[in-house]
Amino acid sequence: MIIFLDEERAYLYWATHHRSGYVLDCRRKPSKSHLTLHRANCPSIKHSENKKTHWTTGPHMKACSLDAGELRAWSVAQCDEEPADCPDCFAPPELHPEDHPLQLTKLGKEILSFVLEAAALHLDDDVGAYWLSVAMVAKCLDKSPAQLTAAVQRIVDDGLLTISDPPKPGEPLSTKCELVPTVAAMKTLPSYQDCDDKQIQRDLNLLLRKVN
């Protein structure tokens, strides 16, 4: 288990790169009234509409672990109560085909979500040059580049990703192939839902300029 205090970038980095982990959202003095357990891929503990959310600053802190049981036990030890499960990320997903016209596969959703989180992290906190290769995504998802090829190509065809080095038919993606979200993909993030396409494209241009 790791506790983040006044470490916004480190916390967001951990949550982005440990998608199978868990995050306990609580106050610095844990209390029964503010104890919520989230999955690390829950949007509510990584993205905000105004980009000024205090994740680990002020009265806030985050306890993170790859083991949900460890965080529950810590919560009981601190305030004699188990945390409430986040109703959004722990509830079984309700699928409405009309709301998901692209019908991405589970792997496709994981890939796109990872790319968006990496882009948002760089744009929000200026953590350095954006560089997200197929090898990096494959390692995080415990897959090989070849296993990602078909899913990535589908996302590209759907207009949600661009790639720097399209593979030849029948060949896997290059490990150095860079994945970049499109305007349409960025608009699925809470902080960009109300932005116009030109503003989003300006932000993407800024993101890409950091590479050059």
Image (cartoon, grey):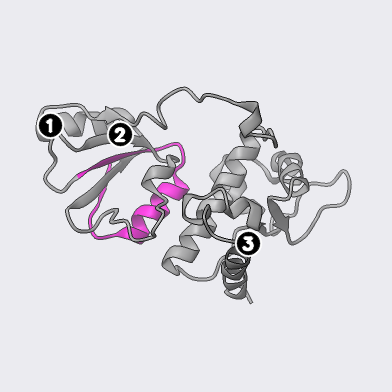
According to the picture, the residue beneath numbered tag 2 turns out to be 37
For residue 181, say whether it is visible: no
Res 106 → quadrant: top right
Q: Secondary structure at mark 3?
A: helix
According to the picture, the residue beneath numbered tag 3 turns out to be 197
Q: Position of residue 124 (x, y in %)?
A: 44, 64
In this view of the protein, which residue sits in the foreground, 55 or 1? 55
Residue at point 12%, 31% (across, down) = 77
According to the picture, the residue beneath numbered tag 1 turns out to be 77
In this view, which residue lies farthest toward the right? 169
Residue at point 50%, 58% (across, down) = 120
Which callout, 3 or 2, points at the residue further toward the start of the chain?
A: 2
Disc 2/disc 1 C-alpha distance (Å)? 15 Å
Quarter of the figure with the C terminus:
bottom right
Verify whether residue 22 appears in magenta: yes
Tags 1 and 3 in contact by the CB under 8 Å rule? no
Disc 3/disc 2 C-alpha distance (Å)? 34 Å
Amino acid type at circle 1 is Ala
The local crowd at label 2, few if under 14, some if 14 to 19, many if 20 or more residues have their Cα within 10 Å, is: many
The local crowd at label 1, few if under 14, some if 14 to 19, many if 20 or more residues have their Cα within 10 Å, is: few
Which callout, 2 or 1, points at the residue further toward the start of the chain?
A: 2
Q: Say which of marks 2 and 1 sits in front.
A: 2
Q: Position of residue 211 (x, y in %)?
A: 61, 72
Q: Position of residue 86 (x, y in %)?
A: 34, 31
Q: Say which of marks 1 and 3 sits in front.
A: 3
Identify the magenta region. Answer: 1-26
Residue at point 61%, 44% (across, down) = 111
Amino acid type at circle 3 is Asp
Tags 3 and 2 in contact by the CB under 8 Å rule? no
The local crowd at label 3, few if under 14, some if 14 to 19, many if 20 or more residues have their Cα within 10 Å, is: some
Amino acid type at circle 2 is Leu
Res 22 → quadrant: top left
